[in-house]
Amino acid sequence: MSQQTPNPGADGGTPTAPLPGRERLVLAGRPGIPSQVGPFAHAVRWHDTLYVTGQMPTDPTTGDVVGADVVAQTRQVMTNLRAVVREAGGRLADTLMVRAYLTDFADYAAFNAEYERWFVDNLPARTCVGVTGLAVGALVEIDLVVGLPEGGAR
């Protein structure tokens, strides 16, 4: 009979308790929030900061990619992000950092036009990177870091 080796933890050492104040948020099945397409949480709350996993332009009900162009896909990604942030007790208006990934930098101007509709006031810091491909064949993916006044709703 073979014995299974215990998982040594991500750092290769003995598994330890999670970082104090860290809360993993898996929100599948909640209204407006798509299921994950991999082994990750939708977001992680650590004290008054929310780290939101990159969202894809997928319909929360069907899982299908929404839109054939970067504008429609950006709109769906932002809609999905808003749903995750709200479920965690936050607001898009309190976004501190945005990381956007585009498969074609020829779409940069069109992406920016839609992006600006979502951050009218208080533009967050942002990085935008061109990539060779994204999960589910998406043209755009966006992740966020959001400040949660008073730690957000729990």
Image (spheres, rainbow, N blue to C red):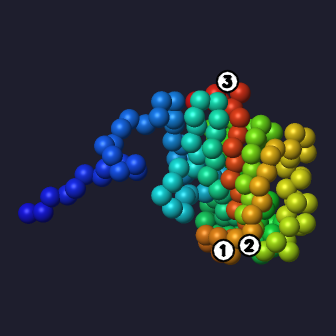
Q: Nearer the viewer, residue 12 or 78?
A: 12
Is residue 11 shown above or below 129? above
CA gap, disc 3 and disc 1: 37 Å
User: Mark 3 or 1 closer to N-term?
Assistant: 1
> Which residue sits at x=88%, y=60%?
112
Q: Is residue 80 visible?
A: no
Tag 2, which secondary structure? Answer: loop
Residue 15 screen position, x and y as percent:
33, 42
Amino acid bearing label 1: Gly
Tag 3, which secondary structure? Answer: helix
> Which residue sits at x=36%, y=38%?
16
Q: Which residue is mark 3?
A: 150
Q: Nearer the viewer, residue 61 or 57?
A: 57
Q: Nearer the viewer, residue 140 or 81?
A: 140
Q: Is residue 125 visible?
A: yes
Locate the C terminus by quadrant. Answer: top right
CA gap, disc 1 and disc 2: 6 Å
Amino acid bearing label 3: Glu
Q: Which residue is mark 1?
A: 133
Q: Which residue is mark 2?
A: 103
Q: Label 2: few (<14), some or many (≥20) within 10 Å? A: some
Select label 3 or label 1 by which is in front.
Answer: 1
Residue 139 screen position, x and y as percent:
73, 71
